[in-house]
Image (tube, grey):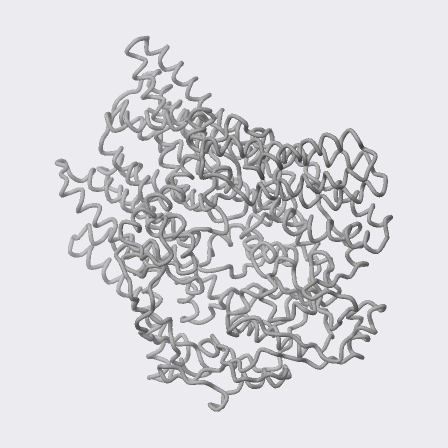
Amino acid sequence: MKTYDKINNLFGWLCAILTTVVYIITADRFTSWWDTGEFIASAYRLQIVHQPGAPLFLMIQNIFSNFALGDVSKIAYWMNIGSAVCSGLTILFLFWTITALTRKILIGRGGTPTNWMVIQIMLAGVIGALAYGFTDTFWYSAVESEVYAMSSLCTAVVFWLILKWERRAEEPDANRWLILIAYIMGLSIGVHLLNLLTIPAIALVVYFKKNQQITWKGMVKALTIGITVLALILWGLIQYSIRIAATFDVFFVNQLGLGFGSGIVFFFLLLVGGLVWGIRYSVLQGRPILNISLLSLSFICFGYLSYAMIAIRAHADPALNNNSPDNVYAFLGYLNREQYGKEPLLRGQTFDAQVTGIKPTETYKKGTTKYEKIEGISQYTYSNEMLFPRLYSEKHADYYRSYLGLAPNENPTFSDNLNFFFKYQLGNMYSRYFFWNFVGRQNDEQNYGGYSEGNWISGLKTIDSRLVGGQTDLPESMYTNPSRNVYYFLPLFIGVIGLIWHFRKDKRFASIVALLFFFTGAAIVIYLNQTPIQPRERDYAYAGSFYAFSIWIGLGVLGLADFMNRKVSLRASVMTSGLVCLLAAPVLLISENWDDHDRSDRSLARDMAYNYLASCKPNAILFTYADNDTFPLWYLQEVEGIRTDVRIVNLSYLQSHWYVRQLSNQVNDAAPVRLNFDTAKLAEGVRDYMPFVDQGIENYVHLDTLLEFLLSDNPTNQVQTQNGKMLSYLPAKKIEMAVDKQAVINHQVVPSKWSEYVVDKMKWDYPQNHVSRAELSLMSIVLTNNWERPIYFTNYTPTNLMAGLDKYIVDEGIVRKLMPVELPKQQEGQLMANMEKLYENATQNFRWGKYGSMNFVDVDSRRMMENFIYPDVYAQTTQLLKQQGDMERAKAVAVKAVDILPKRTYSLNEALTYTDIVDTLYKTEEIELANRVVKRNVSLVKDYLDYSESLVRDKPDALDVRKIRFSLAALEMYDAILEGTNERELYAQVNKTFTYYRDKYISE
């Protein structure tokens, strides 16, 4: 058996090394989109990320950052390598898990394996582990600094350890494995909570091992215990322990007059004392179950102590201090994810329900010397509620009605509720992701219910035609898209064989794997209760489920060999099965997935961050809005130290009391942001919401007067609500602000040639029916700043969040600068533009890395370029320069725009956006370049229109009128452009194409 162990260890480590090397080769060299910028910045300086935090992940990633040896440009890469290493180790433990399960079936306890048994076991482990290693979802998480790679490692280790315990359960010290599992679970809380979902499966392993006679009643009891333990940890330990500590602290501070934290210390000592007494009692009384339970609880608590990092660092008030959890109640809100709200699970409202009652709640906040009572999150009752609510989001009402075919005033029924759960939540938001990984993926576009974006496909034309249609005229751009990955059902087929074989050979452990599969898949769907139109795909949440299925892919090797052994020899069946499954799973997966999972040449997230910061003058204030125009900037400032003088203010966070307070902090080289009020005026529970109450004021109200009114605590300046509470309110929407012209000129706020257009007063209309902390703080910043610091907004920021100030923003490319000017001949609603800045940024200042030479461009990068760069920077700049008759500079911008085009076409947006650029190229005699863009884009449009016709034949409800109009508009514009050129042959082709499709679609 020692020889077997050596072979098992050798092949396991070989799989781990192979996958780790692949991940390192394909890893991002810098930050990625979404949360990675925040995680890298926070890990590097041990700061506080968004709720509910990941302290252990941050501390481990901080260790990896040291391998950069002081080269700040390599820190992100080393943290990405940290995820790669965690993912490689996950494959190691998956390999050992598969071989342990296989060995249990083939050899049994104490048996001596034959050579062919060992070969079968190793083949199962290699194929199952490598198949999972190269799946779409797992590989995506393995190459970026996100929590999911480390969370997968925790899940893999815990599941392997319970198998280790099961094999050694009769040994005197076997329970040490259970204690180790508890400790890793405690540690995993500081990474992600997904690991806890293994607990029901662990409970079943323990039941099967400790009971000779297995009954359904016993299994249900074991599962009930497992689910109860899961709930006790998830809600009891993680949340209610802090809640109890908070209650103690309130008593000790408010009633006994002791200092903040005294009650927490008492509770901690009480908890430790109780655990020590209980463990000692269990030993003295010979209570082994109580003993192992208390020891396990103790080690879970030890692991959970990684969250002390959050409290400690929050007290230091670092630059990134989300929720500022520096006291027990703020910490509790941080753990509870209060800023994100909660989805109803057991009973809740429907989307069309009306509020019939409000039950106020109370909580506390830390005051100067005591805890102060404040209004908590209110609880509502509704006119229409149902069990297991899935259709609860009011803002998604139109989508629900469209998806379910409900009439405008039709109330949803429980049947509609279940229909949405099975079709959308289980189907679209889980099964689709599952099939992505084991059957095939159409492309990386986000799916909103259409037939051509983000669906699962197989690569088998007959089946795919029934699923998504349009396969007979599939455009080359779709067929050759690197993110189109097809596996022909082969990994799924092998996994199903493994599942069947596993249940036939070992029903107990097959049930355990099935339970793991359920709790890390469908159970998460039930718990998350996601609304439609998510900001991005959520497949990463279900990686544990795909992990469990990959166990069956490994066992599928044995199932196929077992079947073949009926006809051929064991040697032939094993070798054939191993070769077939190796090619049909890991080899097929890595060959299909490599090109779109290789991020080694991506840098656009970092480049965009640089471009945003480079667009700002020194000591600027830059208002951002969402993840992708904020987190990469944090990374660049906090890690690489670039443009640390620019103060980033996120408007979404600015709605929070803690973020308003943090404006007064110095951040790196950026000075504090001045406000004209004490931030206690916007403290927690104070002015959370200020409605507009029309007072019939027709004249413009001075901004300073309006702010004074909004911040007044005088009851005469407030309105009384139905529950008697006094509320500050907005009395008028017409606002004006006096402009210090001399300050504007002295601080070079506007271009010198615009000095004469500086207004005496800025006048604007407030666009919303309420004021939050964000709008109030924004207006206060503008007023108090008095033009001393440049103020910018990213082009990602919606204008309706600018408190009406968008009337005075000037386009400079990817930022809009606030300027108190009104230009002559400026049309109503048209954005002012600083032509010099636009040109300089477009041709000289902006960096795009390897964007134009990459073999594949990911969907997030494409969205950024197609929605915010091509139209806002290059198309607009060429158009404005042509209007001014500056053809030389228009040409330079147009040539640069073509230079950053990706090597292949992806979407219709690009085809329409580039019409102005093409027109400029023809007018400046860049004929060859213009012809290349025309041919490229017209070919894309033509292919799409052919595909659309084929799609509608297969799926009559798939007609996308908007895209067809979009396509025809692009063809019409290219036709009009070419008509005025000497390119007669190309014009004839385009005109023929346009005429054909116009007649075809318009007549139809």
What residue do we see at 62% from left, 83% from top? Answer: 701
**In the image, is residue 523 above or below residue 267?**
above
**In the image, is residue 384 above or below residue 295?**
below
* Image side of residue 146 versus residue 853, left or right: left
**In the image, is residue 738 above or below residue 283?**
below
Q: Quadrant of residue 653?
A: bottom right
Q: Quadrant of residue 503?
A: top left
Q: Position of residue 580 (x, y in %)?
A: 42, 18
Q: Position of residue 119 (x, y in %)?
A: 38, 19
The quadrant of the picture occupied by the C terminus is: top right
Is 598 or 991 nearer to us in this picture? 991
Count of numbered circles on the image? 0
Is 716 or 203 nearer to us in this picture? 716
* Image side of residue 615 versus residue 329, left or right: right
Is 485 or 19 nearer to us in this picture? 485
* Image side of residue 619 versus residue 115, left or right: right
Q: Position of residue 490 (x, y in %)?
A: 41, 24
- The residue sitting at the front extreme is 1003
The quadrant of the picture occupied by the N terminus is: top left
- The residue sitting at the top extreme is 568
What residue do we see at 45% from left, 64% from top? Answer: 339
Q: Position of residue 946 (x, y in %)?
A: 57, 31
**In the image, is residue 981 above or below residue 771?**
above
Q: Quadrant of residue 623?
A: bottom right
